[in-house]
Amino acid sequence: MTDENPAPVTSELPDAPFHTSGTDHITVWGSNEADTLAFYRDLLGMPLVLRQPNLDDPSQTHLFFDTGDGRILTVFVSDERASARGQRVNTGAVHHLCFSVEPDEYEEIMAALEEAGKGYNVFDRGIFHSIYTQDNNGLVIELSADKYEIPDGRKGEVLATAQRLREEDGADFAQDRHMEGALEELGLPVNKHDLPDADAGVGV
């Protein structure tokens, strides 16, 4: 695809030989179990729901965390690995992981990150509000709260409609007016959450 012929943005299923039915789990390379538990379980509050050997390499342990809605994050860990200072950025690497948080817990989350000595940034991304921090290995972790109430199963439809309105408006990115217009067009209530003012972070 080129800029002159971009791929269409739509919530309709593409013409593909099959379609996925959701996200089952994401797996990342971790360091050791203690540091991994300290961040994902003890700070982010994800229950550790399964621990077993990595079936491809039994010298490692495979930790399974419930991210809050039954979807799973798994981490390969080994007590021989120390936590790293940062990630290597390259094609195919993971840029960041994003987990949903409740809008009314935003202030508590920022206070907890500060108490844990974790730096963070807060941005208003137009379609959602995000806190960015890093895990024990420098992997960027985004904690995202929807700016508007969106019924379960309708998010893709709302975002695709906001995208169309954004393009018609000639805006560089989706903003409040596009989200509100999408909800209204789809006959959904426009209920905006009370979130702190923040910069869009464009170009950061």
Image (cartoon, grey):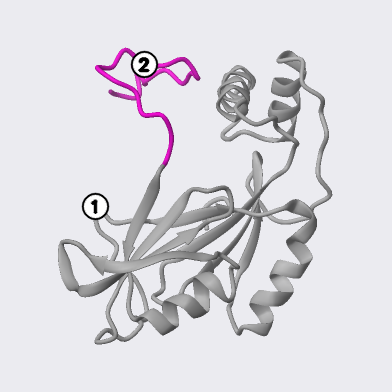
Q: Secondary structure at mark 2?
A: loop
Tag 2: amino acid: Pro
Residue drawn at x 61%, y 17% as measured from the top left = 168
Q: Is residue 69 above or below residue 122?
A: above
Q: Earlier in the sequence, mark 1 or mark 2?
A: 2
Tally of numbered discs: 2
Report x, y in % for residue 118. 58, 79
For label 2, the residue is 14
Residue drawn at x 57%, y 24% as measured from the top left = 163
Residue 91 shows which numbered tag? Answer: 1
* Left or right of residue 6, residue 11 in this image: right
* Left or right of residue 90, residue 94 in this image: right
Residue range highlighted in magenta: 1-23
Asked which quadrant contains residue 14, the reply is top left
Residue drawn at x 31%, y 12% as measured from the top left = 15
As for residue 10 lying within the magenta part, the answer is yes
Report x, y in % for residue 127. 65, 39
Residue 187 shows which numbered tag? Answer: none
* Left or right of residue 55, residue 140 in this image: right
Asked which quadrant contains residue 63, the reply is bottom left
Q: How far, Cα to Cα, is label 1 from label 2?
A: 25 Å
